[in-house]
Image: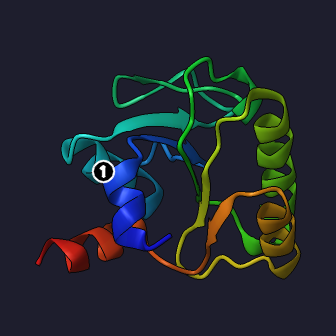
Amino acid sequence: MSIEEIFDNYNTIAVYGMSKQPYKPSHTVPLFMKKQGYNVIPINPTTGQISNLTAYKNIADIPEEIDILNVFRPSEVALDVIKEAVERKNTRGDIKVIWLQQDIVSPEGKLLAEANGIEYIEDKCMYREYIILSK
């Protein structure tokens, strides 16, 4: 599936590692996507709310169906995040795409996601990809 098809077909983006700090990309990128009409759900264990959005401590706590899991965590912990996502997909059946932001990669995570039928993108900024496709 192409990035354009992902943007066109999926609406709910859970953001693992969304920041409370308004100057960080892990804050501005999700809010940009919200302004484009996407349903954005923060995942941050240190707060219950970010920019008037309910924040959850982990993937499993989110009651809504998740289309895209957007990950803003270091490459070293990305595999653990992907394992959580796969567990949720196997129990809830909802995560269709795992998207690791720019400079975040996980070769093992890619294999795990794809083996479980999840589209996988790594090392790409969601904001930049959206802007490129909007031109």
Residue 18 picture location, percent across and down: 52, 46
Q: Is residue 48 above or below residue 121?
A: above
Point 87% across, 52% down: residue: 83
Left or right, 48 with reference to 30: right
Residue 48 picture location, percent across and down: 56, 20
Left or right, 79 with reference to 97: right
Callout 1 amino acid:
Met
Point 75% across, 73% down: residue: 75
Q: Is residue 61 above or below residue 70?
A: above
Point 82% across, 81% down: residue: 107
Q: Is residue 57 above or below residue 119?
A: above
Q: Which residue is mark 1?
A: 33
- For residue 28, say whether it is visible: no
Looking at the image, which is closer to me, 89 or 54? Answer: 89
Residue 27 picture location, percent across and down: 41, 51
Quadrant of the drawing holding the C terminus: bottom left
Instruction: Place residue 59 in its image quadrant.
Output: top right
> Would you call the spot at circle 1 few (<14 residues within 10 Å), some (14-19), or many (20 or more)?
some
- Label 1: element kind: helix
- For residue 8, say whether it is visible: yes
Residue 98 picture location, percent across and down: 63, 58
Point 34% across, 75% down: residue: 129
What scheme was used to colour the molecule? Answer: rainbow
- Figure label count: 1
Q: Is residue 59 above or below residue 113?
A: above
